[in-house]
Every structure is written in structure tokens, then in C-alpha cells.
Amino acid sequence: MKKTLIALSLLIFATSALAKLSHHGPYLGAQTGYTNTDNSHAPDKWGTYRIFGGWRFNDYLALEGGYNSILDKSDAKINGYDLTGKIILPLILGFHAYVLGGGQYVKQDIKNDSYDSNSSALLPVIGIGGGWNLTNGIAVDASWRHTIGVNNIKNIDFIALGVSYTL
């Protein structure tokens, strides 16, 4: 009986602790990381960033939009605006995993001695990630996003670390 009471108390405590770490409602965040493109005229780059905002409807679903500075050099600029849906799997102790899918409007302007491309397109984006709710408003995450290229705009991979704040 005593063991059952202790186990029940721990379960209630753990459930209430996880409920306090649930982030619902609007959120803002930023990510930075590494970008790899399949375009030989656009070099891979560290320091790529993404600024985003979204709405987490419940423990399992969110909608997110953002701006991504994929490449910004004097002879090559690639930027994107995305809108994705996220399916979230809450884990224990404030950890969560997610998959995402949606679209990204990509604008590319690459000009150098041997190549000249000024293109834009709406492209599909998919990804996976995981995060940890540090407090009742601040979360950190790691993710991989893959934009599926077409024609002059090649595949883009973005591997990132980020932080977000639920308002």
C-alpha cells in the first residue's frame, strides 16, 4: 500500500511538472547553424540564421512562419520565407520531438564570373527536430530542415540550434 501511494504521488508530481512546462499560444524564436546547398556556385555556410514566430495550439500541433537568411555574400544571396505545420511528440521532463512540413518561398541571386542566376520559387520544406522546455516560457531546440529544390534553386539543408520564448 505504501509503495502504491508513493508511486501515485510521484506520478501526480511528474504530470503536474510536465503540465507547467507545456508551451501553448504564440511564440517567437531564433535559430543559427549550418547551411548546405546542392548548388556548386553557392558555397556552404556557417552562421546562417532564421527568425520565426508561431502558435502552438496544444501539446501536439503548431503552425510556424519564419525568415531564413540562407546565404548572404557579395556575389551570392539566398533568402527564404517559410510556413510550416509541426506535429509534436511530448516526451518526459520537458523534452519533445517533432516533424514539420510546409512551403518556403526562396529567392536566389547568384552572380560570379561563370554563373548568373536570379530565381525565385515556392518550394516544399520538410524537417525533424527535438527540443527541451527549460522554463515555463523558454525552450531550446536542434533541427534539420530540407528545402526540396527545383530548376536553378537546388536542395537546401539547414542544421540549426535555436531558442524560443512563449509569450
Image: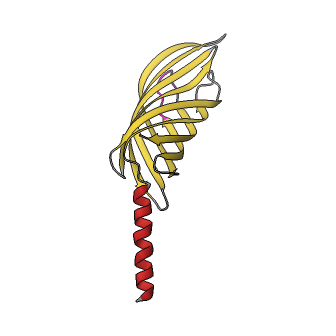
Query: Which quadrant holds the N terminus?
Result: bottom left
Q: Residue furthest bottom?
A: 1
How far across and down, in percent of the image, does residue 106 sit?
46, 23
Rendering coords of residue 15 (x, y %): 40, 65
Q: Residue at x 60, y 33 (%)?
A: 36
- The answer to whether residue 136 is above or below residue 146 is below
Asked whether 154 falls inside the magenta stretch, the response is: yes
Can I make out residue 86 in this image?
A: yes
Q: Quadrant of the C terminus?
A: top left
* Region rendered in magenta: 147-155
Question: Would residue 34 be counted in the magenta stretch?
Answer: no
Q: Which residue is found at the position 45% from the left and 18% from the top?
A: 120
Give 66 or 100, whichever is nearer the viewer.
66
Residue 158 drawn at (x, y percent): 55, 36
What percent of the width, then of the height, locates residue 2?
Answer: 43, 87
Which residue of the protein is positioned furthest toward the left in this rendering? Answer: 57
